[in-house]
Image: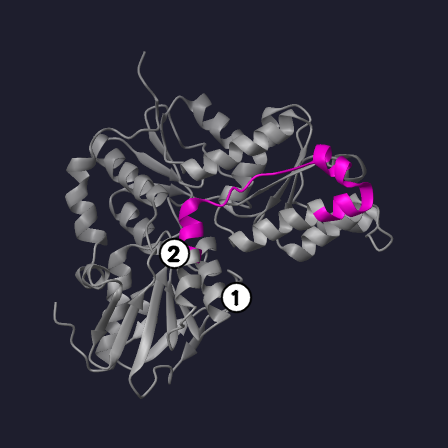
Amino acid sequence: MTQTYFRRGFGLKAEVKPAIDAEYQSAVVERIRSRGFVDRFGDVKVRLAKDFGFCYGVDRAVDYAYETRHKFPDKRVYLVGEIIHNPHVNYRLQEMGIEFIYPNDGVFDFGHVTSEDVVIIPAFGVTVKDMKALQALGCILVDTTCGSVLLVWKRVKNYARDGFTAVIHGKHLHEESRATASQVEKHEGGKYLVVRDMSEAELVGAYMTGRAQRMSRDAFMNHFAGRTSEGFDPDADLAKIGVANQTTMLATESLAIGARLREMMAESLGDEHAETHFRSFGTICSATQERQDAVLEMMQDPPDMMIVLGGYNSSNTNHLAHLCRQYVTTYHIEDATCIDVDVGSIRHKPEIDAEAPVAVEMEWLPPAPFELGITAGASTPNNKIGEALLRILEIRGIEADL
């Protein structure tokens, strides 16, 4: 029988490595890394966070996408959504002839995919429904779903199996959160609820424990409309909950949400009740945690300014920028094109909200010698970091001697 499902690549890593290295590596970034993550260029001292940029899961997904195009040069190759949240990487895949299937109101249309085609599953994964639809087509599937995401899926499936509602800390429209929530469908009667932040967790906790200030049932359902499983009943389905999260959320917030929900249950219903009616597992991916920890380490002695690189729709990048803003002036930029060398301006997103408008600053670089900190989200290749730094140095009239 012909194999149609691939999760471990095609053994072509050596063949695609030269192209990937040429497109995504940076000499200036490697120089700074080799010098202990600190270097000086003219009057600018540059510090790199000790963990930044491409993580293992992203490396793997990009490798597999390149391998897929190399393996099937004559087949139509589709990608469900985006491989990762980085515009440069996604554009390069499109240049290679990989066709993107974008959702319409969260729904993917696979009507044009045939059994002769190849479909790449992104690092975020896809919903149970979408996976079944693709399998039914008989096409070749290349699954790049990140291992950290699969770990969360396992937890959520176990919650559903044991009669616990999965309370997922995440963005309900994010591809990963949608795929994670759908895992409850693998067990009859499985339920989920997606909360965005601590304030929404407080609403859930108040309703769950019957506190006097809790919302009415109708108000609760209206507030969480579109963020619950079908047939969700807060009066019945919040009796037993298990906490999980989108892997790229702010780690401290996810942990705090889990702790607060358990605390509210124990305060109102007793610790013994919480022992049997509450579950929680740390499901922030290690790469996300490491990048956040590296930023916090840097902020013990903050630079004068931070540049955070990554897609504006990248959750982990947004959270890195949010962390940095608590300590120092921070500019979240998508890539080097946000820095205009001719006029010396920077275009950046000043808020964590992915839909927040961008802002343009003219007088943003200090006139005197200064210390510049740089980090990047897990979907940002090193070449984009290097390009941004070189543009900043060019505005200062500094030529990097590489």
- Image height of 370 relative to 279, above or below: below
Q: Residue at x 58, y 29 (%)?
A: 157
Residue 127 in sight here? no
The residue that disc 1 covers is: 356
Q: Amino acid at mark 1?
A: Ala
Quadrant in the rendering for residue 70: top left
Quadrant in the rendering for residue 308: bottom left
The residue that disc 2 covers is: 377
Q: CA distance from mark 1 to mark 2?
A: 18 Å
| 395 with respect to 202 (left or right) | left
Q: Amino acid at mark 2?
A: Gly
* Image location (x, y in percent) of residue 400: 16, 72
* Image location (x, y in percent) of residue 401: 12, 71
Confirm whether the magenta stretch covers residue 270.
Answer: yes
Badge 1 density bin: few <14, some 14–19, many ≥20, Cα 10 Å: few
Mark 1 in CB contact with mark 2 (< 8 angstroms)? no
Q: Residue at x 46, y 34 (%)?
A: 150
Q: Quadrant of the C terminus?
A: bottom left
Tell me the SS state at disc 2. Answer: loop
Q: Indicate which label's residue lies in the foreground, 1 or 2.
A: 2
Instruction: Write down the region rendered in magenta.
Output: 263-292
Q: Quadrant of the N terminus?
A: top left
| 352 with respect to 388 (left or right) | right
